[in-house]
Structure formats: C-alpha cells, structure tokens
Amino acid sequence: MEPVAIRGHHLLCALGFRGAGYSPAFVENMAAILRRLDATPAAPVLLVDAPDSICAACPSSHADHCTEASPLQRDRAVLSAIGHASGDTAPWDEIRTEVVRAFDPGDLNLLCANCPWLPYGYCQEGLDRRRKQRDVIS
Ligand code: SF4
C-alpha cells in the first residue's frame, strides 16, 4: 500500500474534523482520506512538513496558505513532539496515538494561535475525547 502523505499539523486537525473545511471538495477529500486511514489502521503514512494529500483539494482561494511559514512551522512542531521528522513513514494508528499522548487540548491555544478554526473548539474537543479513551490514556 502506497503511503498517504500527511503534514504534521493535519494529524491534529484530523482529531477535530467534523465535516467543516474550505470548500465542499476539500471536505470530501479530507473525509475520504480519514475514512480510508481509519478503516486500515496499519496503513503507512508519510509524514511531511509541506502540502499533503489533504492540501491537494484546497481551493485556489486558499492555496497560498498551504505553503506559508506558519503551517509549516506547526507541522515541524507536531512532528518533533511525536519524535518524528519530515520523510518518516509510520502506521496511521501508531502516529495517531503518539499525537494524542503528546498534546493537551490547551496546547492548541499557542500552537494554533492564528488558525481560523481554533475558536470553534472542534479540535480541542476532538483531542480531549481521544485522550479520555481508555485505550489511549491509561
Ligand atoms: S486549530 Fe487549526 S491547525 Fe490547529 S488542529 Fe485545529 S484546524 Fe488544525
């Protein structure tokens, strides 16, 4: 199975994803990727600090965002926190567990300070829910 490229900060975004996004095509693409990965937890993921498989459906009105310094720095911060670097490949389930262990919902206030989705609280709630799952946090 070909690895799916996922940028570091999208590992956090995925935890709070509930069908909102930059356009219907963007939402459908992100939902399809997450459905595939969740259906095959051992699927290999290529970790990157650059536009990824989710960015591939970003509408042109937002495309510049994908290459800006801020999301790239966020990618590197997330990858570093889970002991990985751009170019690493690991199973989806393992990476997701590492992200949930590495971050507290309050961390997003600083890490994602300029993200327009932060005030909705979806990501903090998604991370909190995962952290409370018995199989992730003992
Ligand atoms: S606040 Fe923005 S960057 Fe941070 S996890 Fe949520 S959607 Fe992703």
Image (cartoon, grey):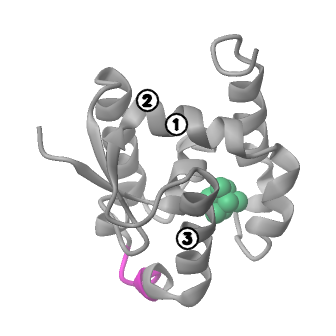
**Residue ID for mark 1:** 96
Amino acid type assigned to the residue bearing label 2 in the image: Asp
Residue plotted at (38% across, 27% down): 38
Q: Position of residue 83 (x, y in %)?
A: 55, 53
**Residue ID for mark 2:** 93
- Secondary structure type for disc 3: helix
**Residue ID for mark 3:** 76
State the residue lying farthest toward the top.
134
Q: Earlier in the sequence, mark 1 or mark 3?
A: 3
- Is residue 125 positioned above or below 74 on the image? above
Rendered image quadrant of residue 25: bottom left
The Cα atoms of the two marked residues, 1 and 3, are separated by 16 Å
Rendered image quadrant of residue 138: top right
Closer-to-camera residue (18/82)? 82
Q: Which region is colored magenta?
A: 59-64
Rendered image quadrant of residue 24: bottom left
The Cα atoms of the two marked residues, 1 and 2, are separated by 5 Å
Amino acid type assigned to the residue bearing label 1 in the image: Arg
